[in-house]
Amino acid sequence: MEYLGLLFEIIFLAVGVYLYLFSIGKLTSKDPEIQKKAEAFRQKNKSWMRIAALLLMALMSVNIYLHIVELAN
């Protein structure tokens, strides 16, 4: 059960990284219509998405560290 929690923490960390990459414009789509919609959404919401992604990454990094320390004991 402990490993399942660690797995979810790693998944949430990956979601945070993905959200951050999207918010700074590093992720693109091959379909121009989807890319146009994504760019419009990103321009409207990039400030709060960037902050949310950084907070999520920081929180999950601390949780993963504490989880690993707990498993080592």
Image: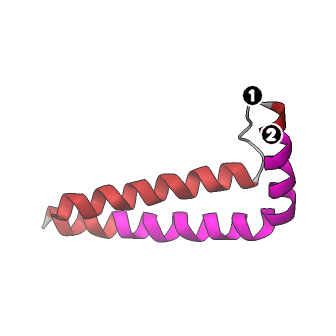
In the rendered image, residue 36, in percent from the top left (x then y), is placed at 86, 42
58, 2: nearer the viewer: 2
**Residue at 79% across, 62% down:** 46
Whether 58 is among the magenta residues is: yes
**Residue at 80% across, 39% down:** 35
Indicate left or right for 53 with 12 as reference.
Answer: right
Q: Are marks 1 and 2 in contact (CB under 8 Å)?
A: yes
Q: Which mark is residue 30?
A: 1
In the rendered image, residue 3, in percent from the top left (x then y), is placed at 20, 58
Label 1 neighbourhood size at 10 Å, few (<14), some (14-19), many (20+)? Answer: few
**Residue at 31% across, 70% down:** 66
Q: Quadrant of residue 19?
A: bottom right
Q: Which mark is residue 35?
A: 2
- Residue type at mark 1 is Lys
Label 2 neighbourhood size at 10 Å, few (<14), some (14-19), many (20+)? Answer: some
Q: What distance separates the C-alpha of mark 1 from that of mark 2?
A: 7 Å
Quadrant the C terminus occupies: bottom left
Please give the range of residues in magenta.
Answer: 35-64
Q: Which mark is residue 47?
A: none
- Outermost residue, front side: 33
Give SS at disc 2. helix
Indicate left or right for 8 with 58 as reference.
Answer: left
